[in-house]
Amino acid sequence: MAGLMQQDRLQPSLLDRLTDNNAQRKPYVYASAEKAARVGNVDTEVVRSKPEADDKLIVNSRTLKEFIKRDLAWLLNTGNLADVTDLSDYPLTAASVLNYGMPDLTGVLVANTDVHALQKQMRKIILNFEPRIIAKTLKVRVSKSEQMTQNALTFEIECDIWGQPAPEYFYVNSELNLESGLFEFKDVRVGQ
């Protein structure tokens, strides 16, 4: 990816940079004497994985959007601590990674759902755990349509994400199945 322009050189999240997607590859052995390690009186070879290719450290905007879509799916499909423990006396814990995820919505009926409170809660959770989203641009909406069943809600998440040299538009349409409590992402738009 050496040919990318500076404005296209975006980095993936720390998790993506630390993840070894090729754990089965053979380790690389440094054979030169100056790269060998000395343990006690024994010379040993330094065995490491080959350095990752530059394409692992730099992504284009389309790939970054796919990472954000995946990370939002993980966030919205993970149950949080506040769902099982009262965190009102612990506001710092409520805002920390210990409280990563959404409250469990399994078994909630569409008719009994406070849509505005749910939108507000989702927006707060997304902003708390997805720093690549520009806060002032995030819109979370419930789309009420005739196709909605009694057991599902449709959400639209629309925002700008950090980009170089300018922010990038991001849109995803998701359906929340209230029987299973899972979000499923349907449509992702990569441009406005």
Image (cartoon, rainbow, N blue to C red):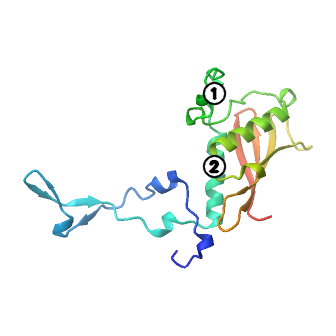
Total labels: the figure holds 2
- Where 105 sits versus 160, above or below? above
Measured Cα–Cα span from mark 1 to mark 2: 19 Å
Residue drawn where x is 81% and y is 32% of the image: 117
Side of 19 relative to 179 (left or right): left
Image location of residue 1, percent across then percent down = 52, 74
Image location of residue 74, percent across then percent down = 61, 44
The label nearer to you, 1 versus 2, is 1
Residue type, mark 2 in image: Pro
Task: Using the rendered view, name the quadrant where residue 34 is placed.
Answer: bottom left
Compare residues 69 and 146 and report the one nearer the observer.
69
Q: Residues within 10 Å of mark 2 (few under 14, many from 20)?
A: few
The disc placed on residue 131 is: 2
Task: Using the rendered view, name the quadrant where residue 84 is placed.
Answer: top right
Residue drawn where x is 75% and y is 33% of the image: 178
Outermost residue toward the right in this view = 146
- Where 179 sits versus 132, above or below? above
Comes first in the chain, label 1 or label 2: 1
Side of 150 relative to 27 (left or right): right
The disc placed on residue 41 is: none
Q: Please state, as top left, top right, bottom left or bottom right, where the C terminus lies in the image.
A: bottom right
* Secondary structure state at the residue bearing disc 2: loop
Residue type, mark 1 in image: Pro
* Secondary structure state at the residue bearing disc 1: helix
Image location of residue 6, percent across then percent down = 59, 73
Q: Residues within 10 Å of mark 1 (few under 14, many from 20)?
A: few
Compare residues 84 and 24 and report the one nearer the observer.
84
Q: Which residue matches tag 1?
A: 91
Image location of residue 92, percent across then percent down = 60, 30
Residue drawn where x is 82% and y is 28% of the image: 109
